[in-house]
Image: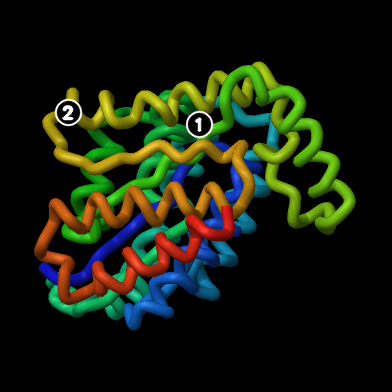
């Protein structure tokens, strides 16, 4: 396996998209073949499904368990398209290409929203994941969080920003979440390493403090990625470790 799949997970309003764009630029500057994407979405048909899923989540006339099941089916239908049309071609059907894929939300958001929150049947989620994701499991997952004591102020500040900068149809229900619900959902994301370990599924997670400046957030990520690559030599031909170390030094001067 030579291709590297990195996912960025966590609550809304933690700067995942901004961090992904910065990380992609840094990796491209080292010579890596990088592609970014997001879920639900990533292809025209999957983006259309994303809109349907978003509308479904806003409905209040459907029992939670029924809604969760419908959303689960929609998410994996979109994911199948995304993997077949974008992820697998870039990484290689057998993960043989020397390339990097960065995805804003992937399987972990499904486990949080549909299983841990929505009550979907775990065996069904695992079955869908095995059938559709297969070998396209993340090699490294970055979990973005806000420190508990900063959630209320940061949440209000970031919510005010999106209300003034986004069209109404671009605002996700999770963007306007209350501090209490935000912390509850964040706690579910933070439990994911233990959750997968309990299932006997080996995963690599790293926590990212999203309350820091953009420069410090990306510096955290680069440092974590360097440590990961030092341990996983199978990706040495995919990402130039020495050049990445050089970028870390440059970032240190900007902090």
160 lies left or right of 142: right
Element under label 2?
A: loop
Picture coordinates of residue 214, whole percent (x, y): 61, 52
User: Is there any visible trace of residue 76 in the rendered image?
Assistant: no
Which residue does the image show at 59% across and 66% down from the upper left? 48
Which residue does the image show at 29% across and 61% down from the upper left? 5
Picture coordinates of residue 193, whole percent (x, y): 28, 30
Along the viewing direction, whichever of 186 and 119 lies nearer the viewer: 186
Residue furthest front in the image: 253
Picture coordinates of residue 237, whole percent (x, y): 16, 76
Circles 2 and 1, Cβ within 8 Å, touching? The answer is no
Quarter of the figure with the N terminus: bottom left
**Within-10-Å neighbours for mark 2: few <14, some 14–19, many 20+:** few
Q: In which quadrant of the rendered view does residue 96 lie?
A: bottom left
**Within-10-Å neighbours for mark 1: few <14, some 14–19, many 20+:** few
Q: Which residue is mark 1?
A: 66
Which residue does the image show at 24% across and 68% down from the upper left? 241
Between disc 2 and disc 1, whose residue precedes?
1
Q: Which residue is mark 2?
A: 199
Q: In which quadrant of the rendered view does residue 169 lie?
A: bottom right
Which residue does the image show at 50% across and 43% down from the upper left? 71
Q: Which mark is residue 233?
A: none
Along the viewing direction, whichever of 73 and 189 lies nearer the viewer: 189
The vertical placement of 36 against 221, above or below, is below
The vertical placement of 180 against 216, above or below, is above
State how the image is colored. rainbow
235 lies left or right of 60: left
Q: Nearer the viewer, mark 2 or mark 1?
A: 2
């Amino acid at each position: 396996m030579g291709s590297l799949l990195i996912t960025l997970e966590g609550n809304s309003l933690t700067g995942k998209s901004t961090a992904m764009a910065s990380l992609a630029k840094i990796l491209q500057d080292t010579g890596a073949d990088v592609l970014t994407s997001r879920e639900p979405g990533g292809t025209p048909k999957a983006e259309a499904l994303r809109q349907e899923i978003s509308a479904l989540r806003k409905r209040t006339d459907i029992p939670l368990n029924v809604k969760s099941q419908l959303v689960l089916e929609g998410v994996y239908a979109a994911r199948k398209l995304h993997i077949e049309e974008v992820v697998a071609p870039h990484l290689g059907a057998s993960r043989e290409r020397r390339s990097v894929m960065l995805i804003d939300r992937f399987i972990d958001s499904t486990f949080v929203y549909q299983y841990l929150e929505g009550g979907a049947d775990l065996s069904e989620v695992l079955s869908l994941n095995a059938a559709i994701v297969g070998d396209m499991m993340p090699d490294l997952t970055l979990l973005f969080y806000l420190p508990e004591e900063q959630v209320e102020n940061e949440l209000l500040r970031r919510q005010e920003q999106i209300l003034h900068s986004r069209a109404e149809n671009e605002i996700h229900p999770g963007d306007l979440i209350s501090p209490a619900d935000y912390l509850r959902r964040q706690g579910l994301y933070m439990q994911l390493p233990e959750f997968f370990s309990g299932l006997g599924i080996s995963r690599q997670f790293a926590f990212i403090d999203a309350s820091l400046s953009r420069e410090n957030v990306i510096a955290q990520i680069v440092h974590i990625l360097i440590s990961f690559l030092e341990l996983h030599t199978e990706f040495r031909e995919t990402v130039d470790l020495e050049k990445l170390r050089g970028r870390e030094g440059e970032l240190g001067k900007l902090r």
